[in-house]
Amino acid sequence: MNDELAMPYFLTHEETTKESYRAMVEATVKAILDAIADDRAYGGKSPQELQALIERPTLLPPAGLGFDQVLQELESVILPNFLRTTSTDYLAHLHSPALLESICSELIISTFNQSMDSWDQSPIATEVELQVTRFLCSLYGYPMESDGIFTSGGSQSNLSGLTLARDWYCSKALKHDVKKLGLPPSYSKLRIYTSEVSHFSMEKSAHLLGLGYDAVRKVPVDKECRMDSEALEALILLDKEAGLLPFCVVATLGTTDYGSIDPVHALSAICKRHKLWLHADAAYGSGVQLSTQYAHRLGPIAECDSITVDFHKMFLLPISCGAFLVRDGKNLEAFSLHADYLNREEDEEDGYTNLVGKSMQTTRRFDALKVWVSFLVRGQDGYASIIDTCIENAAYLYGQLKKNSAFEVAIEPEISSVVFRLQATCEVNKKVRRLLLHSKGVVIGQTVYENKTFLKFTLLNPLLTHDKLDELLLLIEELGKEIMG
Ligand SMILES: *Cc1c(COP(=O)(O)O)cnc(C)c1O
């Protein structure tokens, strides 16, 4: 019998399988540690170079290669070319490094492979997710009747929010049961309001919900990229006069590019006046709630009917990890449906929760464990210090950019993203970003503001220091000069 055949399938109670598990995990850990030889964010290879590197005759060899050989290939071609999110040279997106203890959580999650659909697939995991969800509802100031569910991230949470909003409005205002009957005859008149710098999952959701992109009304923003609440109300009134059916406003608490925060209080008053659902897309800003100094910047978030929380952004947990919270938990009924083989009604009467009844997904990861572990490990202080550092770094960077005539800044940051550009052509700015990526191992963001190419630093890494930020600005200035000759 060769080694491959000797390799067990699973980790079981048998000692031999435990030894294999330990050996494989240890070898993997060693390979990971060896791959991190310097502090760059990226090795610099182009798409073509990477394609050539992973080229092979087949992905399904007639006989298995065995773990050791495959690990060697991982070590030689894959691991060295990973983007390293923990590097302070990685500042491109709302894409965070993963806290150490959360990597341990991931190992536990995949080792035990619980599925969150029914209690008999995830007994303790179900109870932990329920506990974490209740805690999150209280963290965001929600009342007793609130509820929530873990999701794959912000996009799914936003789709959930818009689904509940549509069903609620159709039931209440049109006396129409969407869940049973599908869209009402007047569906093409339904309108969602969100700012012109909101996340594209609004349009995607509108499409999936059968309403289409045109159902999303883009409300202008002020100079700080926050939704203009007067413009919102004017648009709602205009649309109502035209016979349209406004049903939902989405406040972005932390826009993807600028981190700007829509005025929740004003939007909430408008929603009350016009009987609209208010959803908070706090995929980015939800982390600010853990700051002792800056949490107030989010405004009265508990006034929103539903909230998108993303843990794979400011909370520094591995992908994927998100939650969707609802102020009146009854609205989650939108996702309930009984299957004889899965979530029998009699189970629920006896106290067994089958979480599938609140979720869009069926088979679902135990992502709530990562929140449970990291919240306990870091505590309020630990998280506040992470979030405050990122917010303060952004304020520092903004100050440095304002002082330097080589640069221009879009807006003053409210959270931890800074959008700026070299006072040069768009081409020069674009070239700087490419050069950083392929020859300096530095990965930064790029966007468009007022029709011009801007660069972006998204500061989610608490290891970033003021000195490091100064160094990066200097590098960008020098590259700009080099390009311009
Ligand atoms: C990141 C982001 C999303 C999408 O979240 P995913 O977890 O990537 O699906 C939605 N809204 C905002 C404001 C975001 O920044």
Image (spheres, grey):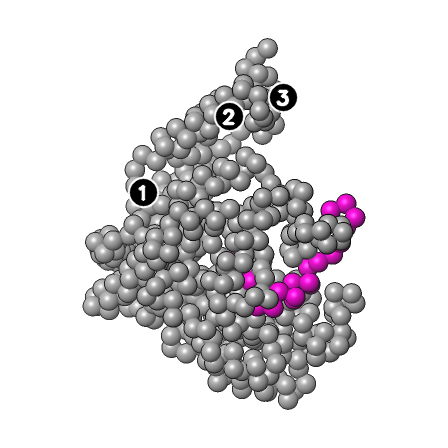
Residue at left offset 72%, top offset 74%: 171
**Residue type beneath disc 3:** Pro
Q: Indicate the position of residue 345 as horizontal and vertical percent values.
A: 76, 53
Residue at left offset 37%, top offset 56%: 380
Residue at left offset 54%, top offset 86%: 234
Q: Which residues are magenta?
A: 323-343
Q: Quadrant of residue 441?
A: top left
Q: Indicate the position of residue 56 as horizontal and vertical percent values.
A: 53, 29
Q: Is there CB contact under 8 Å for labels 3 and 1?
A: no
**Residue type beneath disc 1:** Arg
Whether the magenta-drawn stretch holds residue 107 is answered as no
Instruction: Pick the residue in front: 94 or 54.
Output: 94
Instruction: Pick the residue in front: 421 or 294.
Output: 294
Q: Which mark is residue 321?
A: none
Q: Which residue is mark 1?
A: 40
**Residue type beneath disc 2:** Tyr
